[in-house]
Amino acid sequence: MISRKTRKTRFSQSGYTLFEIMLVLGIIAVLVGSAIYMLVGNIDVAKEQRVESDIEAISMQLRTYEMLNYRMPSTEQGLQALVTQPSTEPRPRRWKQLMKSAPLDPWGNEYVYRNPGKGGAAFEIYSLGPDGKESDDDSGKEK
């Protein structure tokens, strides 16, 4: 039979103290906080990469539109010409829906499309970036 003193000693030595639990939670909080701090810059890089891949995909669809209709959509028709048939001139001869919806950039804004582009380019596509305003820091814009 276990004596009363032995039972009391075993009970008082088992488990964790409040201090030990708080210490472990504090260490976990510091680790999580530093991981989040280090990942914040990666989110911006990922958004920039998404802009580049979106522009490539849109450009491919615009070239397909051009092959079907012998011209690119006008600036006024915009990227919406890949989604719905344009009702303004120049009207496409063999229009086909090439995208389900007009794509939005990672910040929720529509991509800017111009035909013709600046500097002699056939067309120009870029994102206004996180500020949503035309400026020199726009994503995908030729500098």
Image: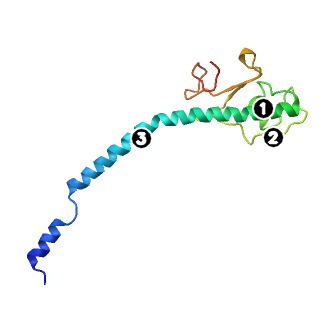
- Residue at left offset 25%, top offset 52%: 22
Task: Estimate the x, y position of residue 35 in percent, counting from the top left.
Answer: 40, 42
Element on which disc 3 rests? helix
Task: Estimate the x, y position of residue 136 in percent, counting from the top left.
Answer: 58, 18
Q: Earlier in the sequence, mark 2 or mark 3?
A: 3
Q: Is residue 41 left or right of residue 116?
A: left
Residue 47: quadrant of the picture: top right
Where does label 2 land, which residue? 97
Q: Quadrant of the C terminus?
A: top right
Q: Is residue 37 left or right of residue 89?
A: left
Q: Are marks 1 and 2 in contact (CB under 8 Å)?
A: no
Where does label 1 land, which residue? 62
Where does label 3 land, which residue? 36
The front one of 32 and 135 is 32
The residues tagged by marks 1 and 2 sit, at their Cα atoms, a distance apart of 11 Å
The residue type indicated by label 3 comes to Ile
Task: Estimate the x, y position of residue 137 in percent, counting from the top left.
Answer: 57, 22
**Residue 80 sits above or below residue 136 on the image:** below
The residues tagged by marks 3 and 1 sit, at their Cα atoms, a distance apart of 39 Å
Residue 104: quadrant of the picture: top right
The front one of 33 and 101 is 33
Whether residue 109 appears in this view of the structure is: no
Element on which disc 1 rests? helix
